[in-house]
Amino acid sequence: MSIPKFKDSQIEAIAKIIGDTSKGFTGSQITRLLAQIGIQDQNQIGTKWRRIHYWLSHLQYKQDSPNPVIQFIQIAMDPARFIDDPNLFNDMRTKLNAVLLLHGLEINPSGKVLRTRKAETLDEAHRRASELRQKLIQRTIHSNVLKFCEAEYFQKNYFHAVFEAVKSILDRLRELTGITDDGVSLVVKVFDEKKPLLSFNKYQTPSEKNELMGFKSLIIGLVKMVRNPHAHEAKLKWAIDEKDALDVLTMVSYVHRKLDESVRTNY
């Protein structure tokens, strides 16, 4: 089933978001973005959003296809453009998705426009565009967790989201210690009871030792509960819903925050 062409009102809304005076792209940036879809807009007549609106409407009519609009959005929403301001990417993506969902499309965390279930009302579009991210924000999920599993979570692929999240802990341990082991073996070596390589306390008193060893047990528990079943069981046999996924992501986020506080020991 082909993607229908955008309504003029939808193109206008997209243009206003990308060409927003305070938060959107600059005039020269818009010129370069248009050049990437074959438009040499040297005269730059009109406001930023009006330029975008004019050229996207023109190309859609000329090609009799919504593809130029989709291509322009993907070029503009390349995450690499937002390295210094990821919050702007998230804000712009949420606003664009509120428009695109009414057209049966959605921008994923990688900046790609994908098909999705069409929103039937404006309220539904706004709710779906913001609710998943808001849930993660409310949980203050650590950036290391989002880096590994945000794409899967927003696609509601909770099975793989939690799997990738737990993998992020093991990658972090390897990064911090240089040990190349995997799974439980890695955790046991990093948090050896006699000579731990990492610690977020002085590891001297019984309470400090119990705290760090409890942290070690928590990580091992996550690996055994999430990573091992995922590696060996089919998705249908290891069902997980959004509520459980959020709880697991919260625990993984806690682990990363404690690793933020950890330093190499002198053992």
Image: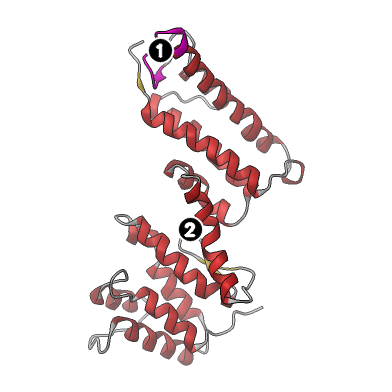
Q: Does 201 lie within the magenta span?
A: yes
| Residue type, label 2 | Pro
Q: For residue 245, which quarter of the picture?
A: top right
Along the line of sight, which residue is nearer the eye, 85 or 172?
A: 85
Along the line of sight, which residue is nearer the eye, 139 or 222?
A: 139
Q: Residue at x 48, y 44 (%)?
A: 141
Q: How many marks?
A: 2
Label 1 close to label 2 by CB (< 8 Å): no
Question: Marks 1 and 2, Cα distance to the nearest angstrom?
Answer: 40 Å
| Residue type, label 1 | Tyr
Query: What residue did someone put label 2 on?
Result: 109
Q: For residue 251, which quarter of the picture?
A: top right
Instruction: Classify the position of the C terminus by image quarter.
Output: top left
Per the image, label 1 sits on a secondary structure element best described as: loop
Query: What residue did someone put label 1 on?
Result: 203
Give the magenta part as a residue range.
197-207
Rate crowding at label 1 as few (under 14), some (14 to 19) or many (20 or more) other CA atoms within 10 Å.
many
Q: Residue at x 40, y 25 (%)?
A: 178
Whole-percent x, y for residue 232 in the image: 70, 35
Q: Residue at x 51, y 82 (%)?
A: 66
- Whether 93 is drawn above or below 19: the answer is above
Whole-percent x, y for residue 50 in the image: 34, 86
Whole-percent x, y for residue 130 in the image: 51, 62
Please tell me which of labels 1 and 2 falls first in the chain: 2
- Whether 42 is drawn above or below 203: the answer is below
Q: Does 35 lie within the magenta span?
A: no
Judged by its main secondary structure, the magenta piece is loop
Instruction: Classify the position of the N terminus by image quarter.
Output: bottom right
